[in-house]
Amino acid sequence: TKRVFTAFKPTGHLTLGNLLGAIVPAVRLQDEADCVYAVADLHALTIKHDPERLRANTREAATLLLACGLDRSLLYIQSQVPAHTELAYLLESTAHYGEMRRMIQFKEKSAAQEEVRLSLLTYPALMAADILLHRVDVVPVGEDQRQHVELTRDLALRFNRLYGEVFTVPEAVHPRVAARIMDLSDPTSKMGKSDGSAAGTVYLLDRPDDIRRKVMRAVTDSGTEVRHDPVGKPGVSNLLALLAACSDRPVESFSYGSYGALKRDVAEAVVERLRPVQERYAELSADQAELSRLLSDGAALATRRTAGLLAEARQAIGLP
Ligand code: TYM
């Protein structure tokens, strides 16, 4: 069977972009593959953070992943499995400064800050470790993570060539319509936890009225024609993508006479898509002890399952 891994960075609240771009594909893969999923809390240390908020966001993200249906897989919190940081160091020693510095996300995020944490630069080596640790074939991610998975492949191939065949070379998979959900108030930039605007980002735990308000105020264009054309009509195309992904129908199946009618249907489709997730989240949140137990069992199992790979990588690179 195929092996699958993906992770979510708790830099803020999980968004509709996370759900449609990666969580839904990850839920589906559970039927056909051996799946491992994690909350990548170490990745959230790459930018300015508040310790208490990070802890709360990490727990919220883990609960939300379960509520979205990732409840038939191994699920854990990255920092509770030290093998991630250990393998990351071996991969930092495989990667080159130049290729790290050229990563698009590093360039964008470092340009926007005065004090850039060193971990923001080395972050893709940790992400590669996350993936390679589990001998993964498939990584379901949104479009924005494509370059990091490419780098993971390069590092795996380089390590294997230099030190022997240790790593499986993984492949990224992206959803057909929702690989890049855009910000509702700026449809030329990605909807994101940390980079998007609050008015243009739908969070998985937003109240129905807030969702409706955000969708109804979505930026479109001065035309009137509803048609899927991401370059010419980014706002309308994003709404069509949301409708398609939330109602599980192809983009071509919709026909609307006005932007208002489209927005009303998108708002209701998103509200209905999130309703069962929010209900399940409330149920799961009521039993914090059960959640703690599940996550610590997950970390223990992940530690056992990855020990062999870590030992092989240490041996190959020349450690005792
Ligand atoms: P993160 O936490 O930013 O996002 C989690 C997942 O959601 C996808 N995504 C989107 N997809 C479509 N439209 C959007 N607007 C949108 N926003 C986010 C992301 O592509 C991602 O799949 N570095 C990763 C987390 C990570 C990881 C890993 C992923 C850590 N280790 C190992 C895969 C494998 C990140 O920051 O994703």
Image (cartoon, rainbow, N blue to C red):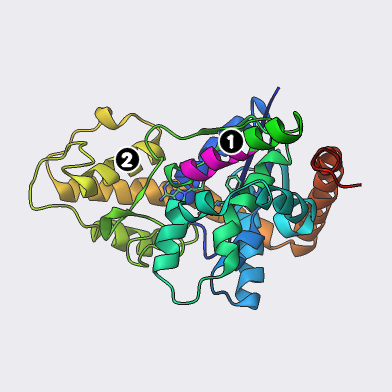
In the displayed structure, 117 sits above or below 6; it is: below
> Which residue does the image show at 24% across and 32% down from the upper left?
254
| Residue 32 point in image, percent of width and height | 64, 25
Give the quarter of the image for residue 171: top right
Chief SS of the magenta region: helix
The first of marks 1 and 2 along the sequence is 1
| Residue 176 point in image, percent of width and height | 40, 32
Amino acid identity at mark 2: Ala
Residue sitting farthest toward the left: 223
Give the quarter of the image for residue 177: top left
Q: Quadrant of the N terminus?
A: top right
The answer to whether residue 170 is left or right of residue 253 is right
Residue closer to the observer: 196 or 156: 156
- Look at the image and say whether residue 224 sits in the magenta stretch: no
Give the crowd class for mark 1: few <14, some 14-19, many >=20 residues within 10 Å.
Answer: many
| Residue 136 point in image, percent of width and height | 67, 33
- Look at the image and say whether residue 153 sits in the magenta stretch: yes
In the displayed structure, 296 sits above or below 228; it is: below
Q: Which residues are magenta?
A: 146-155
Marks 1 and 2, how far apart in space? Answer: 29 Å
Q: Which residue is mark 1?
A: 153
> Which residue does the image show at 47% across and 41% down from the upper left?
146
From where the camera sits, is residue 230 visible? yes
Amino acid identity at mark 1: Arg
Residue closer to the observer: 240 or 174: 174
**Label 2 SS:** helix
Q: Which mark is residue 213?
A: none
Q: What is the number of callouts on the image?
A: 2
Q: Are marks 1 and 2 in contact (CB under 8 Å)?
A: no
| Residue 197 point in image, percent of width and height | 35, 66
Q: Which residue is mark 2?
A: 241
Q: Which mark lies nearer to you, 1 or 2?
A: 1
